[in-house]
Image (cartoon, rainbow, N blue to C red):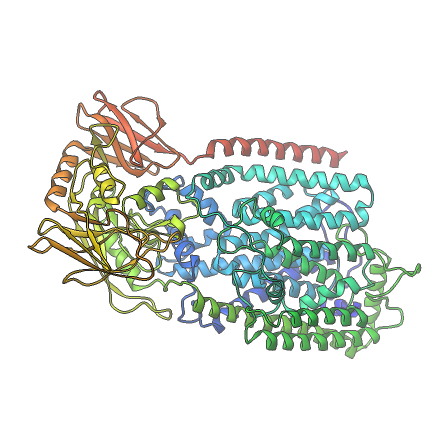
Amino acid sequence: MPPVAETVLDEVEAEGGEDAGPGPRTGAPARRGARAAGAAALLTAVLFCLATALSRSHPFGPVTRNVVDLGQQYLPYHAYWRSFLRGETHGDAFLNWNSGFGANFLGDVGTYLSSPVDLLVVFFPADRIELALYVVTAVKITAAGAAMAALLLRLRPGPWPVAAALGTAYALSGWTFNFGSTVPMWLDGLAAFPLLCLVGEWARTGRRPVLGPLLVALAWIANFYTAYMATLGAAVVLAVRLLTAEETATVRRRLAGALRAARSVLVGVGLAAPLVAVVFLGTKTADPTPEVTFAPAAWTDVLARFLPATASTASPALFIGTPALLLALTLPFNRAVAPRVRAALTAAVVLVTLSLQWEPTHLLWHAGASPNGVPYRQAFVLCGLLLIAAWFSVAGGVPRPAALLAGGALLGGLAWAARGSVDIDRWTFPASGAAALLTLIAALLALAAARREPSGAVGGNHRDSTGTAPEAPTGDNRENSTATARQDSARTALKAPARPARLLPLLAVLLLVAAQAGEAAVTGKRIEEQQRAEVAWSPRTGPWHEAAAREVARADAWPRHRTDPGEVPGGNDVLLVGGQGADYYSSLTSETTSRTLVSLGFGAYAKGRHPVTLDNPVTDALFSVGTRMRSEPAEPVRQDAPPRATVTATTVPVPPLVTVRPSARPAGPSGDSAFARQERLLGTSVYELPAPRRTGRALAAHCPAGSEVWFWAPEYRGTATLAGQRPVRFDGKPPAVSAAMGALGTVPASGEVRIALDPEGRARLPREPVGCLVRARLDTAVDRLTATGATRVRTTGHTVTAALPPGSTGVAVLAVPRISGWSCAAGDADLRPARAYEGLVAVPLDGRADTVHCSFRPPGLRLGGAVGAAALLALAATGVLHRRRSRG
């Protein structure tokens, strides 16, 4: 951008430039930063909404946005977060009674909900939770664009409209559309990267020693997973700045800046430790996912992801827009930028790109563990580095024709090499070509404007008297002679009646923004459409969810017994509609919860981290599920309309939440089938377990007439049909999906059981796949457990207190999975870590206590609190020392 363009668009009339001292920025530079951030925020918000509208997605269209985890995790969690903030839940910040029969809620808060932006959901009604989540997503993306625009002007002065356009390019990168917008918690890392780079700038120049750690803490609290990646990326940027900026030209200053940055990070992470430690230890006890071996993507696909309208989970999303990418590619050839700046930034971009593809550095980016699913979650850092490179190339003026030609040749070679990638969409090359054409026209207009400047103008591509390119101005040093000459030229141009010279750069900026904006809107539209067509999705919330929520609220009798909402489309049902069921989907789902429920016949998705409800009378008795909802869909579930269903509630007698067993070791049938495990936990035999004869695709057995036939085969995929009954579908697909136990029908008077199997692939059956439930036996067991169980149960946010019949001996069993964090005591004894009874919380009884008390505290809370307190003291000491030095 020529100097006159900056002058016209910024209306700079004040003297002076960037301040050199430690005080706050004032005057024109501060106004430019505010304008750039505001413009980037506005443009980002408009384009993100436009992309949603073009794809006909909610809230600007009828089609669901709830693909994969957006519908299965983030939407339900934000619905529960809203209810929690409004005081409408049974649990508190420590424990969530609604999910998984009792789950560590503080760990889930730190994983999904700890961003300050997530608090916005409290302002939306319960039936507008999808709109609330969309607003949260848009605000995070908008904040990222504003933060990047402000950072660019902090790194080097330049035309604020261009900084705003590049900030928008960062916020609406391919990473945002492909990954971030459907995983809202990762968007906090997108905003954290420019903020942490700003913290690095402060540390480098000895400024903001208190505010810096606070920003680090905010980033790590909002989402420590992507904040870790953003911190690594900010360290790369800081290294470049330490090596190239004038203020840190000596080894001593470089070392001091690096040490100040390390202090900011350590103190900031320490302040976030109360939450980070809980999440970290929660991952240690979470159900492990299968080990993943990193396989780098083909370079053809990597190159394709720099282009618009490409989507994939197997390659890094690197689209930043053709205009921004072209500017970044001109940096190595832009002789107006100091050689060491060009070399350092170019090396940083190349090395970070290579690090995406090398397993050791891949593991470093992901904290030592290759993730399941998206393997390139750190790609937003590379997008940010590319935009910083683009800014350094254009901030001092439009690159000369030679640099533009060289950058264009690189861009053309990239597109040619990527032409055979499977990720290329039919919109890719038309969108990229149109954007490139507009960018070329914008560059020609800007160069024409530069030639029309007065003879005294210096411009951004000059050389100094020594014949070498000047050092790039930084955000903290005084304006160098180049910048001063540029301002003089700008003021001269303002006084001159050169209207064409003032209109050309304005038109150039408008064309640049149009190219960037159009390409981003097309990319967002196409990625949303591709995701809906290729990945799993959940319908929009609507009448079905509302009907289930009404029935749950009417029937809820907690803690007298649980209410299970049954199956509601979307997953994590209890977080959306209420109740206290088994459904639970979290990255922190405890291995104890997953293994206990699956071993009892519950189904599970996501490699065990998403146990789902089981409509079985035995498990209902074991977990005190007294009321169960059942739904009858009114129509097939569609993408473009909220589903409808009839919801009914059935209430049956069940034992209380706390029962008493005669022995600390469960008695009951031996065996490893889910039927045998249910009986051991129940304390009596309620199934007939025949040894079925398998002939081809059929099973034959004999059971008591009138008993209920249940089929259990966690790895089976296909249908099973009891003679005379309808087929029942089972969806086992190890290791991702475990099929739930299912009822096939009633045994006829003859007692003959014949089950026809129609498997998809090989039929994998356990040794005891069939159990025949005798209801009379179950009724007797329920009556016994009720008679000997708790006479009264009281719960608070994270505690349970039960009154027991006098003289109770053996063990009190709380119908909650024994996850880490539970402590219990009988009578007035001190709380001790709870024991386990077939995976449930247990308290030994000696006949003298008539009450038991259990409390849950998230593991890591005490350790994190101690570290946080120490970090707070360190921050206070830092502030005091800084003030004394400033006064001195």
Vertical comparison of 654 with 541: above or below: above
> Considering the image in quadrants, where does the N terminus appear?
bottom right
In the rendering, at what x and y percent does residue 122 appear?
41, 53
Hey, which quadrant is residue 744 in on the image?
bottom left
Q: Which residue is outermost to the front?
A: 695
Q: Is residue 522 left or right of residue 877?
A: left
Total number of numbered labels?
A: 0
Looking at this view, is 452 or 603 the one in front? Answer: 603
> Considering the image in quadrants, where does the C terminus appear?
top right
Looking at this view, is 23 or 797 the one in front? Answer: 797
Q: Is residue 368 left or right of residue 483?
A: left
In the rendering, at what x and y percent does residue 5 appear?
76, 70
Q: Which residue is outermost to the bottom?
A: 500
Q: Residue at x 89, y 69 (%)?
A: 456
Q: Is residue 540 among what the camera can see? A: yes
Q: Is residue 116 left or right of residue 607?
A: right
Looking at this view, is 612 or 727 the one in front? Answer: 727
Hey, which quadrant is residue 672 in on the image?
top left
Q: Which residue is outermost to the left?
A: 749
Vertical comparison of 13 with 844: above or below: below
In the rendering, at what x and y percent does residue 437 appear?
68, 77
In the rendering, at what x and y percent does residue 643 appear?
31, 66
Vertical comparison of 727 with 451: above or below: above
Q: Is residue 864 left or right of residue 13?
A: left
Q: Is residue 27 among what the camera can see? A: no
Q: Residue at x 51, y 40 (%)?
A: 276
Vertical comparison of 703 with 760: above or below: above
